[in-house]
């Protein structure tokens, strides 16, 4: 059976058969050494699975089976301290294995998904260890917003993004880590929010820098524009705290590069700074006569303008001021863009012209927003 799986890694039925066999073996194991034997069997399954993934590292069935093996190990670890220690070691190795797979293909979403899942299992295993050792009764409360493993993962994503700005999975992983940390805080008090603002600002300001590098390298790469939407969402959620924190750090601000200079110019408002950067990008594309091939910057601006108009109609005065700033700014690069309706029509006209395959989507987007 091992050789058959090695030769035909996509043989899904064989994975299911192995599951059934192992479940039967587990039920038959009794005695003090049952946990040890179960761990030994699961370790051998991981070794077999590793040999399969070395042969083809994009097999759904192999990754699914690897999930199942670790899940079974987790069940054993809940009842046996030795199995738990072995599991913690194995999960650390799983992180390293994913890193090696991503060295082969940095955009392998199978590896990214499995790495994300393995990190969750590592967190669960550590919770079991703390419960067993009763560390939860004596350990001091966490003071940092991000856990050490999350900080390490953020650094890992930076490495992958800087080697390839079009790495969707790396951008997604950054957003996932931030959302996970926010969810862990739950319904935080105002004091809690003030404590986490510096950590969140560090991430979002770094993201702003990477996004600028990305959109100027390839204006039509979707990965960075998609992630920019997440950054805008995060900034809206903590806008007051971000702006206050940026102002309090004014003596430390420098204009060492374009990103920090733009932030300084916009007083720390990342939404304003990114829109200004997008306008600068369009201006540069026009100067190089490459604007006829450029559509994502225009789509991003159109989407932002339409969203702002909706919130203004709902009574948001701050967004009303922001919308006025953008409407005043965009005629610099949009011909015939006078007033809000003119800006929207000009953006839509450009998109329909340069991206005709999606022209009906652009027309529908414009028409459905009153």
Image (cartoon, helix red, strand yellow):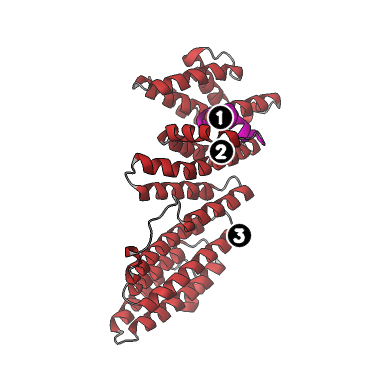
Q: Nearer the viewer, residue 295 or 287?
A: 287
Looking at the rendered structure, the secondary structure element under dot 3 is helix
Q: What x and y, as percent, mark residue 106?
A: 58, 55
In the image, which is nearer the foreground, mark 1 or mark 3? 1
Distance between the alpha carbons at the discs numbered 3 and 2: 25 Å
Closer to the N terminus: mark 1 or mark 2? 2
Could you say which disc has been placed on residue 326 in the image? Answer: none
Find disc 2 in the rendering and name its residue: 208
Q: Residue at horizontal 52%, vertical 43%? A: 202
Closer to the N terminus: mark 3 or mark 2? 3
Q: Residue at horizontal 37%, vertical 41%? A: 191
Looking at the rendered structure, the secondary structure element under dot 2 is helix
Find disc 3 in the rendering and name its residue: 103
- Residue 131: image quadrant is bottom left
Distance between the alpha carbons at the discs numbered 1 and 2: 9 Å
Q: Residue at horizontal 56%, vertical 33%? A: 250
Looking at the rendered structure, the secondary structure element under dot 1 is helix
Task: Report the quarter where the C terminus lies.
Answer: top left
Q: Is mark 1 in CB contact (under 8 Å) with mark 2?
A: yes
The span picked out in magenta is: 256-273
Q: Is residue 63 left or right of residue 331?
A: left
């Amino acid at each position: 059976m091992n050789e058959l799986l090695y030769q035909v890694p996509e043989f899904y039925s064989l994975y299911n058969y192995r599951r059934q066999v192992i479940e039967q073996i587990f039920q038959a194991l009794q005695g003090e050494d049952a946990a040890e034997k179960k761990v030994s069997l699961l370790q051998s399954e991981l070794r077999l699975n590793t040999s399969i993934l070395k042969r083809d590292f994009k097999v759904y069935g192999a990754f699914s089976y690897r999930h199942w093996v670790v899940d079974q190990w987790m069940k054993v670890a809940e009842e046996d301290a030795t199995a738990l220690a072995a599991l913690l070691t194995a999960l650390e190795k799983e992180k390293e294995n994913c890193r090696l797979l991503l060295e082969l293909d940095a955009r392998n979403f199978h590896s990214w998904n499995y790495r994300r899942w393995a990190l969750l299992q590592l967190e669960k295993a550590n919770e079991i260890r703390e419960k067993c050792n009763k560390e939860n009764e004596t350990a001091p409360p966490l003071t940092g917003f991000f856990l050490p493993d999350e900080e390490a993962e953020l650094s890992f994503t930076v490495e992958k993004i800087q080697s390839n700005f079009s790495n969707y999975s790396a951008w997604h992983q950054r957003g996932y880590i931030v959302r996970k940390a926010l969810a862990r805080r739950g319904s935080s008090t105002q004091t809690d929010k003030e404590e986490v603002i510096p950590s969140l600002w560090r991430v979002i300001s770094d993201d702003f820098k990477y996004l600028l590098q990305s959109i100027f390298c390839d204006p039509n790469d979707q990965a960075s524009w998609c992630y920019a939407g997440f950054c805008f969402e995060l900034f809206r959620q903590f806008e007051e705290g971000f702006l206050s924190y940026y102002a309090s750090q004014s003596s430390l601000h420098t204009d060492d590069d374009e990103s920090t200079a733009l932030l300084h110019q916009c007083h720390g408002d990342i939404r304003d700074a990114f829109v200004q950067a997008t306008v600068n990008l369009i201006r540069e594309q026009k100067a190089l006569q490459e604007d006829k091939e450029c559509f994502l910057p225009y789509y991003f601006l159109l989407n932002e303008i339409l969203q702002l108009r909706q919130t203004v109609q709902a009574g948001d005065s701050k967004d009303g001021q922001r919308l006025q700033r953008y409407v005043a700014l965009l005629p610099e690069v949009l011909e015939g863009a006078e007033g809000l309706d003119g800006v929207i029509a000009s953006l839509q006209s450009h998109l329909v012209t340069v991206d005709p395959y999606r022209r009906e989507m652009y027309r529908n987007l414009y028409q459905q927003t009153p």
